[in-house]
Image (spheres, helix red, strand yellow):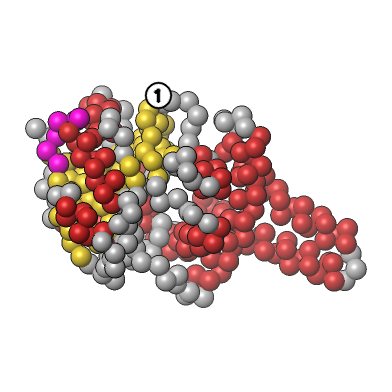
Amino acid sequence: MSRISIVIPMYNEARHIGRTLLAAQKAAHVANVDCEFIVVDNGSTDQGPQIARQFGAQVLVLPGLLIGALRNRGTAIATGEWLAFIDADIEMPEDWLPQLFDIEASGQGDIFSLDLHTPTAAPWYATAWQRRTLRPNSHTSQIVDWMPSSNLLMLRSWFDKVGGFNETLRTGEDKEFTLRLREHGARLLSINQSVALHWGYEMNWREWMGKELWRQGSHLQLLRTHGFSLRLLRFPLLSIAMWILDFLAISALFNGFPHHAAIMVALTSVPGLVLSVRQSIKHRNIGLTLQLWGLHWVRLHLAGAAFILSLCHWKARRPARG
């Protein structure tokens, strides 16, 4: 019988960790695999660690570490030939493991991840933001360049081959990790035959903007670790260009050139429109396109701010969490 180790980083996730562990237990039972749960807690102040222990998880309490280090510490004590990384607010479907084992056995891929969706209770902006990565047609899989770490499944040998997660990154450690896996020959397969549910959706605008500002702070570190490639530079440069256009629009307005200011403002809307159309055209939903247009406009401005702040060595104070 195969053995799988499921590593879950956590910080103050008492609302979700019980659901996450219960769903993963059901998936392991359906797949008929021996399963161990390792929850790596970053110093929670709620009942999350106690709840995790009630579900049979081994809990490591390691405050002060970054997210990559949490996952590496959990993996260090893992005994399974298979490794899964899931976040503490992710509900995996019951058929998660059997279908991915079958796909691996058929030789279609090496590293696997399910698409994510939000529960019906999520606000429109959280749902729209999640749908941008969700493919509308089921029973499809796609080789991708990198994967988020909300759910990852792989043989332990792949983790060991690349030396685990980068422990110096505050965010973006999943992109950096899976980029290295791809560079070492792993095929990253994103699957939407079934989807996982992301219960840790943003409850309000402030939380959404705060998370995006935090996430975008990883660009400079990725450039330092992977070199100054155009692929990694394009988004930071585009976001900084947005700020420059805003400055030019304000300058033109104060200097009595309202038409010039209007042109600059219109130009700031183009990148968000292009991104929203590219991500929503597969859904054929004009409402989603408009929602993503506005969200991308905000996100691009946040990304520019985050990149400039990272150049100034500013660090967001946010505990590492799954």
Q: Would residue 135 be found to the left or right of residue 154 on screen?
A: right
Image location (x, y in percent) of residue 209: 54, 60
Q: Residue at x 53, y 40 (%)?
A: 132
Residue 246: give x, y in percent of width and height. 73, 63
Q: Which residue is mark 1?
A: 139
SS class of the residue under badge 1? loop
Residue 309 position in % (x across, y down): 53, 71
Is residue 154 visible in this depiction of the protein? no
Which residue shows up at 40% across the image and 24% down it? 139
Q: Residues within 10 Å of mark 1 (few under 14, many from 20)?
A: few
Three-letter amino acid code at the position of disc 1: His
Image quadrant occupied by the C terminus = bottom left
Of all residues shown, which one is farthest toward the right? Answer: 256
> In the rendered view of the protein, which quadrant contains the N terminus?
top left
The image quadrant of residue 11 is bottom left
Visible residue check, residue 246: yes
| Magenta-drawn segment | 30-35
Q: Residue at x 47, y 39 (%)?
A: 120
Whether residue 222 sits left or right of residue 106 in the image: it is: right
Q: Nearer the viewer, residue 271 or 203?
A: 203
Residue visible at 14% across and 31% down?
32
Residue 230 falls left or right of residue 183: right
Please give left or right for residue 62 compared with residue 212 in the image.
left
Give percent across and percent down for residue 23. 26, 40
Q: Is residue 34 magenta?
A: yes
Residue 61 in magenta?
Answer: no
